[in-house]
Amino acid sequence: MKGGDSVPVTLYQINGVMVPPVADARLYDLLSGGAVGIVQGCKVTSLGGNQLQIESGWGVCLGRVFQIEQETVNAVVSTGGDMPGRLLMSIDVSGSDTPAALVTQAQSPLPELVQENINQDGTIYQLPLAEYTVSELAISGLKDVAPRAGSPAMYTYMAILKLDAWSGSAEAGFTQTVAAESIDGGPAVTSALRLYAPLREPTGVKSTDETLAEVLRIVSEGVAETGAGTVTLKVWEKPTADLQVYWQGKEVDE
């Protein structure tokens, strides 16, 4: 290439150059550390029947900032019996007349979310907001599932350990697998979730708290391994009581 020839490089931050949305999004995506989720508001509530209301708020998705105004949504209902339902926001950067829209689904099982890299060769990103059970007439069991951008990386997870669910021996160790979930909007339990020292809530009854403190000690000295919605614990003494246990947890690279 000779000096003075044009080169296949575009510099956006100079006078007279219009920055395309994808270039903006890539920069914001980098600066936000790939944040995806709600920053403020957007709480979903049930109004009865098949009506959902989402409050106003805003969030970010791979560098694309969005704002939602308070809206009432008529959810798709079941075609027969109870089935899972979901409210999501769909982002479409393909040039659609509707680049962002609220969408409801009713299907068993719910379809996999489409979450493409919309700053590269993808065009669709579906951000879940709420899940519920829906019949032919009404919604029940509404649950907030929206990821939170800018939230602390640590979340609280809870499980209930049952006295009669331990199996094994003192030589091989006692094990129990329990369902576990976040109580403060954290991601679902997977093998990528690391749990830290277990905790419990005091009851205010001296004898009960002494027993539960001993159970917690046994659990603390054991090993907790996360799976798909579960935690498998291995301890070297058999606990003597049920325990509702809490962990602080965060996702780590597998």
Image: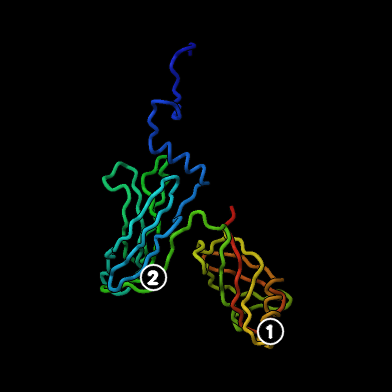
Residue at x 31% of width, y 58% of height: 103
Place of residue 16 in the rendered image (x, y in percent of width and height, measured from the top left): 38, 25
* Secondary element at image label 1: helix
Place of residue 198 in the rendered image (x, y in percent of width and height, measured from the top left): 65, 70
Q: Which mark is residue 10?
A: none
Judged left or right of residue 90, residue 31 is right
Q: Which residue is mark 1?
A: 211
Distance between mark 1 and mark 2 Cα atoms:
36 Å
Name the kind of residue labelled 1 in the image.
Answer: Thr
- Residue 14 location, quadrant: top left
Q: Earlier in the sequence, mark 1 or mark 2?
A: 2
Q: Which mark is residue 142?
A: 2
Residue at the far right in the pictured view: 171
Q: Quadrant of the C terminus?
A: bottom right
- Residue 86 location, quadrant: bottom left
Judged left or right of residue 246, residue 15 is left
* Secondary element at image label 2: strand
Crowd around label 2: few <14 · some 14–19 · many ≥20 (10 Å): some
Q: How many marks?
A: 2
Residue 4, placed above or below residue 61: above
Residue at x 27% of width, y 65% of height: 74
